[in-house]
Amino acid sequence: MAGPKDYYKILQIDPHADETTIKRAYRKLARRYHPDVGGKGNEERFKEINEAYQVLSNRQKRAEYDRLRMGYANRASQSWGPGFRRVRTERARSQDAEDWTSLFEDLFGAGGWTSTNGTPPGATQVPEQQVSIGLEDVARGTQVTLTVESMEPCPNCRGTSVECPRCGGLGSVTAPKNFTVKIPPGVPDGAVLRVGEHARLRVAVRDHPRFVRQGKDLRGRLRVAVPLAVIGGQIAFKPLVGEQVSVKIPSHTNAGKVLRLRGLGLPERGKNEKGDLLLEVELMFPEPFRPEDDRLYQQLLKGHHDVGGEIYAPR
């Protein structure tokens, strides 16, 4: 049985080439083999190049083609046993009967999660999708809908593997399936989740306007009015998640002082403890500044002999 055309070879590109590389290769070859090129055109070659480009430039068509191409390669490597006897594996063809839900159970257990940017050790090449979540989702956990291209028996030949235009004699085609995937609290940015044998899900955590993540801790800057920083007191603010909380500002608090609030950071995966929230104090003068305020600060300045002037390297 002849396998599918090698569109990557036709366009003279690597199977992992990006869209820009595919377009560049197509334009180069199309100009060379276009039928209108005097004496150098090749209509059959041009049609082949155009056919390859139409498939590889379309994400959905390319994904299905890669699936068929990979399936043929696996099939070819397992189809002939010793003595060239035809060997039919009894691996279940009925993907409908497979319990897809089990692919996502304990998704973040052993083998289901890596915190690296690369492919998990021993993993085969599978399609990768990316999901973007907010820092609040990391704190509380969330769920996303994932579409996976799965192999199903060909509806034309009904999985009998006879030659047909739909599956190319492979007996199976790809079809989209939607799943709800739970992402637990504490997921790191860039984590790669292996979804069974069918896909990888890369998690990207968006930047937050108020907080910066440092492992399981959060950092932020807290604006404090100068009078309150001088005499001390309580100030309310809204944490990453939940209702407002209060933090104590010690008297004589200088700008740059870091206040640590235990347990207001992010959860750590697999543990019942949370990180801390670190707030760096930023002094804020009253607005609007009134004439009486000026008079008060002038009186304070008269009683101070040290007006500063030291230079320190930025932190």
Image: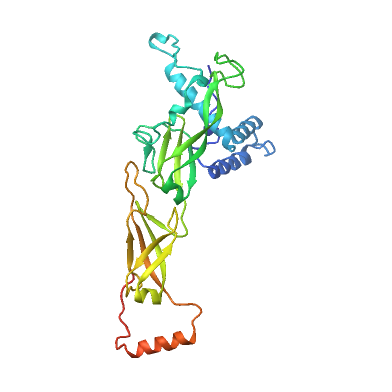
Quadrant in the picture for residue 22: top right
Residue at the far right: name it: 36
**Quadrant where the C terminus is found in the figure:** bottom left
Which residue is more in the foreground, 78 or 239?
239
Q: Position of residue 70 (x, y in %)?
A: 48, 27
Quadrant in the picture for residue 124: top left
Q: Residue at 49% of width from left, 81% of height from top?
A: 289
Vertical order, 306 against 119 (above or below): below
Q: Position of residue 58 (x, y in %)?
A: 59, 37
Q: Is residue 101 visible?
A: yes
Q: Position of residue 91 (x, y in %)?
A: 44, 16
Vertical order, 93 against 227 (above or below): above
Q: Residue at 36% of width from left, 87% of height from top?
A: 300
Residue at the far bottom: name it: 302
Q: Position of residue 212 (x, y in %)?
A: 40, 57
Which residue is more in the foreground, 151 or 2?
151
Q: Residue at 37% of width from left, 74% of height from top?
A: 229
Left or right, residue 25 beside residue 245 = right
Which residue is more in the foreground, 111 or 106?
106
Quadrant in the picture for residue 175: top right
Q: Residue at 35% of width from left, 76% of height from top?
A: 230
Which residue is more in the foreground, 125 or 241?
241
Q: Is residue 15 visible?
A: no
